[in-house]
Image: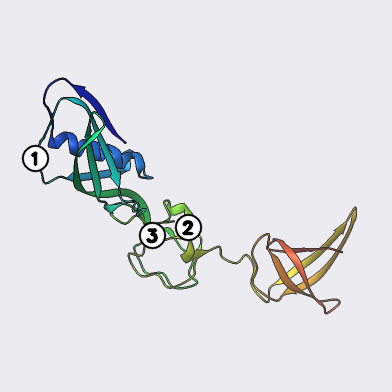
Amino acid sequence: MGSIATASETQVVTVEEIEKGAIEKLVSILPWEKDLLEINVYYKGEDIILPPGKKELIYKARANNQKAGRIPLTLQIKVNGSFHKRIKLTSRVLVTQDIVKTIHSVRKGEIISREKIQLETIQTERPWKNALTSTDQALDYEAKRNLPVGKILTAKYLKKPALVTKGDKILILAEKGTMKITAPGILKEDGYEGAMIKVLNMESKKVIYGRLVDANTVKVSF
């Protein structure tokens, strides 16, 4: 990305023009919305005098996949298609990001409550990948590990709480057409809604697998 202009007389590329073009280049290649970016470009040189002709400013960022922080660039200047000058630029990119963080410590196995977390907006050179962006994404989930105060939450720290617990009594349901068969059961493991779970049939004394329909029912095939 760059700019092209034609002049019949000596022309000047100003420091402001150089830095503005670099910002436009970064906005075009970074994965963030423009409104979420704060970009500062630093050029230590002065205005550049060019001969008459068609001016091209060609910006390139290093191919290191860096998406924020310190991002180096180069500017190649051509006049009438011929190389004239190459300069190095540095930039600092900050990204505005909504994150959810703990404001009180949370123990492993504890259910996340509204009093434990808050939504914050931060500016950072190192955007959090997969950070939760709404408190609703954490509320009523179970902590998979101890979470200290100030911990930024991602999905890997949380899990849905078990709908039922090992040892709970459950109704085993088998259906085929209009036929329904039920039997009392005891859960042999914690279970989650819609997941397969191991259950002991109290009548046959056999351990079977079924799908947990709700907190009271396991559905099996026959």
Identify whether 87 is placed above or below 51: below
Residue beneath the point at 29% across and 39% down: 25
Q: Give the CA distance from mark 1 to mark 2.
A: 54 Å
The residue that disc 1 covers is 46
Q: CA distance from mark 3 to mark 2?
A: 9 Å
- Badge 3: few (under 14), some or many (20 or more) residues near its Cα, within 10 Å? many
Q: Residue at x 46, y 72 (%)?
A: 145
Q: Position of residue 24 (x, y in %)?
A: 28, 37
Disc on res. 139:
2
> From this viewpoint, which residue is outermost toward the left?
46
Q: CA distance from mark 3 to mark 1?
A: 49 Å
Tell me the quarter of the image containing the C terminus.
bottom right
Residue 133 is situated, as x and y percent measured from the top left of the image, at 41, 51
Nearer mark to the viewer, of 3 and 1: 1
Could you tell me which secondary element the residue under label 3 belongs to? strand
> For the point 73% across and 63% down, which residue is it?
211
